[in-house]
Image: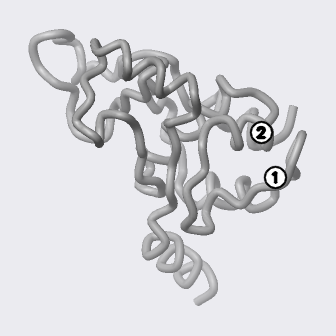
Amino acid sequence: MSDLVDYVLAHTERGECQCGKCFDKGTHPDPEGHTVDLGFFKVAAKDNPDKAEFLRLTKEHQGEFGDCNPVDGKDHSYLELGGWIGSQGVAVQYMGLGALLGIFHTLSPAMLGIKPDDPLYQEMLGMGFLSVQAITAEIKVEHHASTV
């Protein structure tokens, strides 16, 4: 496994946040930034992931089955990221962690007003309509801060 895959697996959980502040599932939403729902499953951060380390590992990662630059500000689907990182499941966890760290906007059928219980929602996910786009202003600020 790559350092990036190891990092993603060490700092995410498939499912809702278990921090102790998010104990009342179902009736109250989790505190902002604790869990992201990516359609296939929810992703929660754990063990204090670091934004700068996530970005460093992203930039150093060599694609498994193709090249990709997830922080270039372009739209990248879980299918493309799955080929780059080596697993579609890990790609979804990677997307969730990046979103929780404030690096990515997530793009899904929900942004079109399609509800998760609508069969079209799952159909669209299966066709690749789940992607991320880097918040480039955040990336530039992070990059600039590290060079000063």
Three-letter amino acid code of the residue under disc 2: Ile
For the point 23% across and 39% down, which residue is it? 32
Residue 30 in picture, x, y percent from top left:
22, 26
- Asked whether 131 or 93 is in front, the reply is 131
- Asked whether 63 or 115 is in front, the reply is 115
Which residue is at the far bottom? 148
In the image: residue 28, left or right of residue 100: left
Q: Quadrant of residue 135?
A: bottom left
Residue 45 in picture, x, y percent from top left:
46, 32
Crowd rating for badge 1 (residues with CA inside 10 Å; few <14, some 14–19, many 20+): some
Question: As displayed, is residue 27 above or below residue 140?
Answer: above
Residue topped by disc 1: 61
Residue 18 in picture, x, y percent from top left:
36, 17
User: CA separation, marks 2 and 1?
Assistant: 8 Å
Residue 53 in picture, x, y percent from top left:
64, 55
Quadrant where the image shows the N terminus: top right
Are discs 2 and 1 less than 8 Å apart at CB? yes
Q: Secondary structure at mark 2?
A: helix
For the point 24% across and 20% down, which residue is it? 22
